Image (cartoon, rainbow, N blue to C red):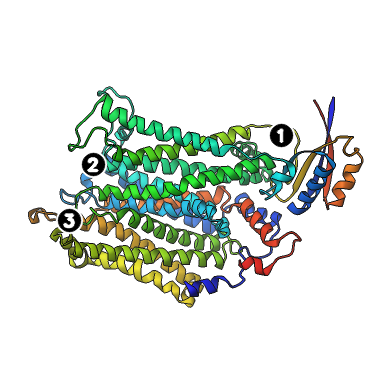
Amino acid sequence: MSRRIHVGFFENPHDLLSAARECRERGVAILDARTPFPIHGIDDVIGIPRSRLGFVCCAFGAAGLFLGLLLQHWTSAVDWPINVGGKPFDSLPAFVPVGFEIMILLAGLGTAGAFLVRSRLRPGRKEPINLERVTDDRFALVVEEKDAALPGEEYALLWRRHGAVDAFVERIES
Amino acid sequence: MNALESAAAAPVPLIGGDKSPARVTRDVASPLEGRPTSLWWVGFLVAFAALAAGVASVAYQIKVGIGTWGLNRTVGWGFDITNFVFWVGIGHAGTLISAVLLLLRQRWRTSINRSAEAMTIFAVICAGIFPLIHMGRPWLAYWVFPYPNTRGSLWVNFRSALLWDVFAIGTYFTISLVFWYLGMIPDLATLRDRAKGIRRAVFRFLSLGWNGSARTWSRYELTCVLLAGLATPLVVSVHSVVSTDFATSIVPGWHTTVFPPYFVIGAIFSGFAMVLTLMLVARKTMRFEDYITKRHVLAMCKVLVFTGSIVGLAYATELFTAWYSGNPYEKFVFANRAFGPFAWAYWLMVACNVAVPQLLWIPRVRDSLLAVFVVSILVNVGMWFERFVIIVTSLHRDFLPSSWSGYVPTWVELGALVGSFGLFFTCFFLFCRFLPMIAMFEVKAVIAEEKGPHGAAHGDRRAA
């Protein structure tokens, strides 16, 4: 079975948003939008769920703090306690700075790593459809044709109604 | 701040010249695609020569030992730690601009955040070199890490402020690098889509297949906010930890509780001065007058006046505390700072850091880019001397007058200082040449926001 993908190109985010709203009202499946910069308010229009990266950050931070304090406790008080200036072996207040830094380090690396993995960003990634100028000055809306929502020949009109400057259709075998 | 506020409220656009997104791409990307200008070559070669001088003196010092420095038994820290604290401080403005101003939704940051973050990374590299070479045997530098070893395992001393420094600077460098690189991915994709041949292959690798998808943008923005939220307490912690190198000792002049906030604000002050210096040069040489406008300069001038005043307050607090404590050693150190053999350095510091920034209250001074440039240079000089004064004047006359001594740097130390500036500017010139200096996607978003929904510029909203 093959899927027909329609792409409309716009010159500014407002035209793209108005086209996306109409698609949504008519029940056309919006696959994605490709834009040169983040557009505010687009998440609700094309139905992007709220990211859970905040929890990842929190979990890595908690793990970092725990592991950092554990490392210091184990090395300074368990494995080989050394008397330094009469200070207690398990000197928790002195362990706060390093614990804090390891917390930040793991939280930051974990969040950035989770973002890359979740967004499938990696060197050598291949693009199924090449959309020109979306990293420069064009705003593309990618939708999938559904006859029940909008027949195939209507998409060109839809794009034009919202001020599209370019459009194309691509057939993808799946 | 009334005078500054009213000047800022004047309707000066954030980005000049009514630019389209394609124009922004062209303006930022085309300097990277042609041959470098002769001005770039002059700057790069001067910086590279300074770096070479630094490499030569450090190589000599590593071969012969740190006896080649002017340090002695009384003054055990001199240029090395001064340069270390100076460079770490320079880095702080980059994080402040990219992280704190992002959280505060200050849109003026978008023209300068990329280069300020690059500055952070290069400054931290410069900073890291000094403790390393101060070890004398830098090939054993890995001993500062807690790794299992055949000596016990003998672990590092986690109660030492110097070890906290290792973790603070290491984390700071790593997180700054991640933040800088993540922030650059969309722009690297823009460059990839313009480039041909080998450059295209390199940018394709570096941009990780970025395609501008709305789903990715959504996660991307959240990631940046989370990293900014992590970097903000981190930047405060880093210079606080650096200050504990001094504050946890019992040396009069160092052993004070005001040190962490005093160091952090001083770092922000010196960092913004360095950002101003670099931005004023970059805007002229790279023709970025429309992107780094008077609005940006004015905003940074405000930060300089504000932080400079707090630095002045910190100096006054130190003097007051020394007098009010009734501690004769503390009193002596501060009298010695102001009137002893290094009085010239102390008063140079006060003049550059407290008096000079106050000139920015005068509209004629802050309107003249040349005057602002001179002020920023003087603040840099003053902040270098602040660290010199804190370190050397607290040490050179200690508890026993029989062990008092002076301190004069040797050519090896001067060479290392010159070399650190060489390294910093060499990195910066390479960065200007190969990577997008201005965050294109953020500037495009700011322009789109300023234009509003119908493509028309709203003069009143620009001023807001």
Can the viewer see residue B383 in this picture? yes
Disc 1 residue crowd, few under 14, some 14–19, many 20+, Cα 10 Å: few
- Residue B262: quadrant of the picture: bottom left
Q: Is residue A1 above or below residue B350?
A: above
Q: Residue B14 — which label? A: none
Residue mark closest to the camera, 1 vs 2: 1
Q: Which residue is mark 2?
A: B65
Q: Which residue is mark 1?
A: A127
Helix, strand or loop at label 1? It is loop
Counting residues from the N terminus, which is met first, the one under dot 3 or under dot 2? Answer: 2
Disc 3 residue crowd, few under 14, some 14–19, many 20+, Cα 10 Å: many
Subunit bearing disc 2: B
Q: Which residue is mark 3?
A: B396
Q: Give the left or right position of residue B278, taking residue B37 as reference.
A: left
* Disc 1 to disc 2, C-alpha distance: 56 Å
Residue mark closest to the camera, 3 vs 2: 3
Q: Residue at x 39, y 31 (%)?
A: A67
Q: Is residue B250 above or below residue B167?
A: below
- Residue A131: quadrant of the picture: top right
Q: Amino acid at mark 1?
A: Glu
Helix, strand or loop at label 2? It is loop
Task: Name the quadrant of the C terminus of chain B.
Answer: bottom right
Q: Nearer the viewer, residue A149 or B313?
A: A149
Helix, strand or loop at label 3? It is loop
Residue B3: x percent and y percent? 49, 75
Disc 2 residue crowd, few under 14, some 14–19, many 20+, Cα 10 Å: some
